[in-house]
Image (cartoon, helix red, strand yellow):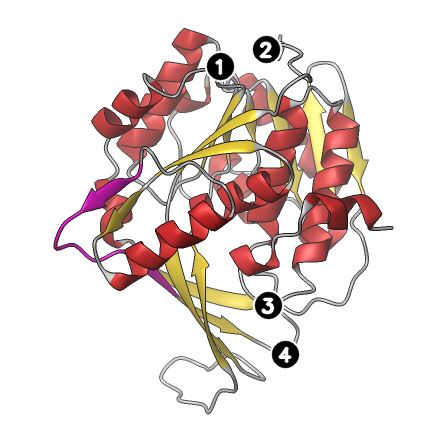
Amino acid sequence: MGYYIIDQSFCMSKIVVVGSSNTDMVVKTKRFPEPGETIIGGDFFMFPGGKGANQAVAAARAGGDVTFICSVGDDVFGQNALKGYQKDSISIDFVKIVEGAASGVALITVNHQGENEIVVSSGTNGLLSPDHVSDALSKTGRVDIILTQLETPIETVEFLANYCNLTKLPLIINPAPAQNLNDAILDGLFLITPNETETKLLTGIAIVDDISMEMASLALLNKGVQNVIITLGSKGAFFCNDNEKFKIPSINVKAEDTTAAGDVFNGVLAVCLAQKKPWKDSIIYANKAAALSVTKMGAQSSAPYQEEINKFI
């Protein structure tokens, strides 16, 4: 059985995002270089990023009341990141600022098809401890849903899973970047949102057709996950729990940069679920937001606002 989210539609949905904060350094190029090859790229951009930050911004722009728990350095990257979160009305009361440490950065190459390759230097993201998150959560007040990813220490993710099981708070884990999760994290988890690569790592099942997709989803349910959404990129998304299963097709747009599509999907989805919208409606709405995001360059800069999503298609 899944958790029931209390209907609090009279107020903004309260989303707590626990995760990473990075600065993205992006180079556009016609093609990716081969190993050992140097090529001449095109335009260079610098954007605020990090999977946690991207999801927090996407949730805030979709109408959520967002508190972001993360760790940044006292360098220029960290200072600029905090200014950006405040601009999007995200609460930074529980951001951990580490003196003399480097904030996280990501080096991103985007080819002419909008596909990307990313290398991340975690920096202070690796210092986001369970103790800091525990202290923050004890002071946040009402929370409707918690969202996290895997760009912070796995011990922090394990703490969140245990905390949410004990408090009966819905936790969404976007298991990216791909890595194995032990069964203690998965048992009782409200929702997991892997892509195809992450699904194979978690279940050992490669998704090659609808049958293997259902098998992988059932494997996650058998581990104790209550709800599964497998994101399929241009092929849409597949939902499965003990009561229903369905596939939502993608929206066809011309991709400029796919860097934060999954993050936008997760952030907007969290808002919809906190507002107690049905699964199908929530996924369709999050799909719209993700489709809009790939038509723009950058991570947080590509996250659409609620009015844009409402008018889309």
User: CB under 8 Å between callouts 4 and 2?
Assistant: no
The percent coordinates of residue 313 (x first, y second) are 87, 50
Name the foreground residue: 14 vs 276.
14
Disc 2: which residue: 3
Which mark is drawn over residue 297? 3
Q: Is residue 189 left or right of residue 181?
A: right
User: CB under 8 Å between callouts 1 and 2?
Assistant: yes
Estimate how packed mark 4 is, as few (under 14), some (14 to 19) or many (20 or more) residues with alpha carbons within 10 Å.
some
Q: Quadrant of the N terminus?
A: top right
The percent coordinates of residue 146 (x first, y second) are 48, 26
The Cα–Cα distance between marks 4 and 1, rounded to whole angstroms, is: 42 Å
Q: Is residue 211 left or right of residue 107?
A: right
Sequence order check: which comes first, mark 1 or mark 2? Answer: 2
**Vertical placement of residue 179 versus 277, above or below:** below
Element assignment for label 1: loop
Sequence order check: which comes first, mark 2 or mark 3? Answer: 2
Membership of 266 in magenta stretch: no
Disc 1: which residue: 169
Membership of 100 in magenta stretch: yes
Which mark is drawn over residue 112? 4
Sequence order check: which comes first, mark 1 or mark 3? Answer: 1
Q: Is residue 206 visible?
A: no
